[in-house]
Amino acid sequence: MGGFLNGFRYAWRGIAVGARGRNFRVMLGVTGIVILLGYFLKISTGEWGLVSLAVGLVLGLELVNTAGEKLVDILSPGHDARYGQVKDILAGAVLLAATAATALGVLIFGPRLF
């Protein structure tokens, strides 16, 4: 059981390390705005579920992106185009998720705001 609980401790430590990044902090700020909007616009339980999934996906992928970038920097301190492509792919995954989350936000919040 101790190993299982230690896994949570390591995971929280990883989130804390990843949360130091500028992009993650910006995404947390946007998340706060989305939560406030959802509260004041009284979105439905189903909409909260979709918003939660979108937020979790974007933040989770940003952590994966940060971890991948750190790993690439360790493996290749100098510039190597192949490693640059890995970083670009990781960033592209975050961009796709953030774009989908934005589209979801427009669908949920747009009619209430305009």
Image: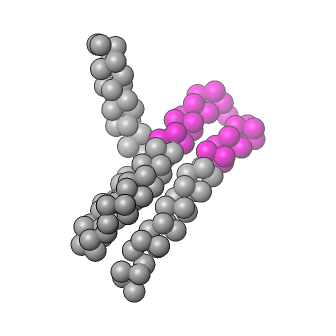
Q: Label the magenta part by its dominant secondary structure.
A: helix
Query: Which quadrant of the rendered structure holds the N terminus?
Result: top left
Q: Quadrant of residue 49?
A: bottom left
**Residue at the farthest top position:** 2
* Region rendered in magenta: 63-90
Q: Quadrant of residue 76?
A: top right
In the image, residue 112 lies at what x, y percent? 36, 80
* Nearest to the observer: residue 99 or residue 89: 99
**Residue at the farthest right position:** 81
Residue at coordinates 32% horizontally, 66% vertically from top-left? Answer: 44
Q: How many marks overall?
A: 0
* Nearest to the observer: residue 73 or residue 8: 8
* Nearest to the observer: residue 77 or residue 83: 83
Q: Quadrant of residue 90?
A: top right
Taking 114 as reference, is 60 above or below it?
A: above
In this picture, residue 41 sits left or right of residue 79: left
In the image, residue 88 lies at what x, y percent? 66, 48
Looking at the image, can residue 33 be seen?
no
Residue at coordinates 31% horizontally, 61% vertically from top-left? Answer: 45
**Residue at the farthest left position:** 40
In this picture, residue 30 sits left or right of residue 84: left
Taking 110 as reference, is 1 above or below it?
A: above
Asked if the stretch drawn in magenta spans residue 69, the answer is yes
Query: Which quadrant of the rendered structure holds the C terminus?
Result: bottom left
In this picture, residue 99 sits left or right of residue 112: right
In the image, residue 91 lies at what x, y percent? 60, 49
Residue at coordinates 63% horizontally, 52% vertically from top-left? Answer: 92
Asked if the stretch drawn in magenta spans residue 85, the answer is yes
Q: How has the structure been colored for display?
A: one colour
Looking at the image, can residue 5 be seen?
yes
In the image, residue 74 lies at what x, y percent? 58, 28
